Amino acid sequence: MPFAGDSIRHVLTWSTKALPEAQREGDKKIRFFLRNADLYSYLPDQTRGPSTVLWDPAANGGLLPSDKRIPAPQRFAMRGRPSGFRIARQDGWVYADLHSVAALKTQACFTRDDRWTDATDWAVEAWYRVADKGTEPVYGLATSMRPNHGRWAMIYLSDDAVGLMTAHQHDYTVLHKLPMDTTDAFHWYRMVHEGEEGGSVSLAVDGKQIVRLPYGKLFARRGGRGLNIVFGPNAGHCEGRLHVAKFGYRLGGTERLLGPITKPASARRD
């Protein structure tokens, strides 16, 4: 819509409610028409509707999160030697067996680039079973949510404890943890940020909230872009092994994604 005036924060709007379906994907060129005016800068609106990414090997035919047969908007990138990633089947379970081997100087995690800000509410959930806590004692098995410009939230995971942690560059800090046996079975982990920048970050395990902290306690990311979501043994040159039966996250909402652990039908019969 046309604009006349003097402003440093004016929001320009389209004359139509939305682009036609065929024009919504791909790069766009924007042309400004000025009359007796100066344009110093502009910034595209970064807001977006809620988006959900969900990986479930029992439902997708046993595909790893990085498999090319998974549509790109749902696919993750593999970081580490392919030998550290495999789909396992045991007692009715179908899961990713992620094994980082120190002798191979590698890691065994999945990453994904995505866009959000500290004003975005989000939720990340997983069904995990720790197989080997590894040789990196703090962040080796952490699940990471960090926007390009904003605060860094992580699920701390060891063989005998779980909690919330954050990081500033290479300084990893566990903010709160509780003792727990994470090796006995798959457990449902759910980390949530709600209330925008002034809100909170919380962690629940098997449906029970174990910690909630002010969002402002998280360190802000400084430098670097991408690798916004990370799960699996992520410490290079270190041991670590994690079983993942499901993983998912939602940006722009905190509705439940996975829900409580349900044993496979074959395991229930046993």
Image (cartoon, grey):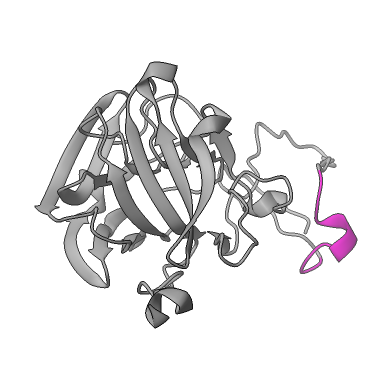
- Could you tell whether 139 is left or right of 53 in the image? left
Location of the C terminus (image quadrant): bottom left
Q: Residue at x 35, y 74 (%)?
A: 260
**Magenta stretch holds residue 207:** no
> Which residue appears farthest toward the left when viewing the image?
179
- Could you tell whether 136 is left or right of 10 in the image? left
Image coordinates of residue 29 in percent, x first then y, are 84, 40
Q: Foreground residue, 35 or 2?
A: 2
Location of the N terminus (image quadrant): bottom right
Q: Residue at x 54, y 27 (%)?
A: 81
Q: Is residue 119 visible?
A: no
Q: Is residue 242 visible?
A: yes
Image coordinates of residue 108 in percent, x first then y, are 46, 34
- For the stretch drawn in magenta, the main secondary structure is loop
> Which residue appears farthest toward the right when viewing the image?
22
Q: Foreground residue, 100 or 199?
A: 100
Image coordinates of residue 44 in percent, x first then y, are 65, 45
Q: Which residues are magenta?
A: 16-26
